[in-house]
Image (cartoon, rainbow, N blue to C red):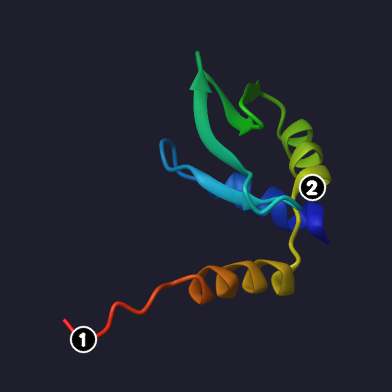
Amino acid sequence: MKEREVKSILRNMKVGEPIHFSTTNTDEQIEVERVFVGLEEGWLIIYQGERKVLKNLNDAVSFLSKHWNLDLKHLLRGQYEELNEMIDLGKY
């Protein structure tokens, strides 16, 4: 299921429009961009400061499905924690 979803997302990506995938660490994300290497398509994956260009769709899918964390409760909890840290400055 997860791999089919990732494959569909990668196939429908537009060149030059990066997509971000969440990971278990809330401070890190996987950035994926569709690129062309010569006449062949590929996917530029930036994860933990490392840049990889994968030309094979199945390789990109397996990498992303291994590192992608789709835990919505975890993501929402992290976003609401940021809201709680806001400081009320009073009436402006």
Query: Could you tell me if the residues under marks 2 and 1 are in contact, i.e. CB atoms within 8 Å?
Result: no
Residue depicted at 61% across the width and 52% down the height = 9
Residue 88 lies, in percent from the top left, at 36, 79
Q: Which residue is mark 2?
A: 65
Q: Which residue is mark 1?
A: 91
Residue most toward the left? Answer: 92
Residue depicted at 72% across the width and 27% down the height = 56
Residue 91 higher or lower than 37, as above or below:
below
Q: Amino acid at mark 2?
A: Ser
Please state which of residues 90 and 6 is positioned toward the viewer in this rendering.
90
Q: Amino acid at mark 1?
A: Lys
Give the SS element for disc 2: helix
Left or right? Give the position of 53 relative to 68: left
Give the SS element for disc 1: loop
Left or right? Give the position of 73 relative to 84: right
Q: Which mark is residue 61?
A: none
